[in-house]
Image (tube, grey):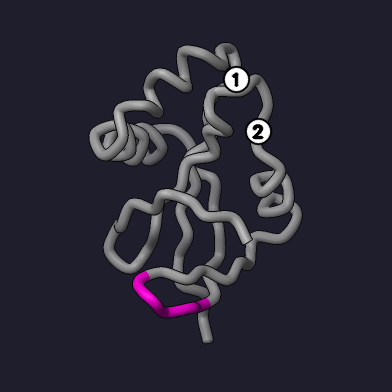
């Protein structure tokens, strides 16, 4: 289990693989890339989600939302350059 700050996006949840601005991605991100199905407990409910790393304009939209919710992400991004911090959308998995 890894506690993360999640940003609601409709039925999806956005999470940021900032690793506190360290030069490498967090270990949970590597595990997620290997198997994108994850169990998420959110608002006292556990469900299975499928993770997708966002790219391009979609990433930028959700990155800006994340920075608005927690300005520290912007600090982390500057700290870990040239690494581009991944933005991940967790969508409810089909039943």
Q: Say left or right for 68 vs 34.
A: left
Mark before the other along the chain sequence, 2 or 1: 2
**Is 17 part of what is drawn in magenta?**
no
Residues in magenta, as a range: 43-47
Q: Which residue is drawn at 65% across and 33% down?
A: 25
Q: Is residue 64 above or below residue 83?
A: below
Alpha carbons under labels 2 and 1: distance apart: 8 Å
Q: Residue at x 53, y 29 (%)?
A: 20
Q: Which residue is drawn at 36% across and 34% down?
A: 63
Depth check: 40 or 55 in front?
A: 40
Q: Mark 1 Cα within 10 Å, few/some/many (few <14, many 20+)? A: some
Task: Name the image quarter holding the N terminus.
Answer: bottom right
Quick one: label 2, few (<14), some, or many (20+) residues within 10 Å?
A: some
Q: Mark 2 points at which residue?
A: 25
Please say if 43 is above or below 69.
below
Q: Read off the residue under disc 1.
A: 83
Determine contact: label 2, label 1, CB under 8 Å.
Answer: yes
Q: In this view, does 13 lie to the left or right of 79?
A: left
- Where is residue 44 drawn, in percent x and y? 39, 77
Image height of 77 relative to 58, above or below: above
Report x, y in % for residue 75: 40, 18
């Amino acid at each position: 289990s890894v506690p993360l700050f999640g940003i609601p996006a409709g039925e999806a949840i956005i999470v940021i693989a900032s690793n506190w601005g360290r030069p490498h991605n967090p270990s949970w991100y590597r595990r997620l890339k290997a198997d994108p199905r994850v169990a998420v407990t959110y608002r006292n409910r556990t469900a299975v989600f499928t993770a997708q790393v966002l790219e391009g304009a979609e990433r930028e939209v959700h990155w800006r939302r994340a920075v608005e919710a927690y300005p520290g992400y912007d600090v982390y991004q500057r700290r870990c350059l040239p690494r581009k911090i991944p933005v991940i959308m967790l969508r409810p998995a089909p039943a």
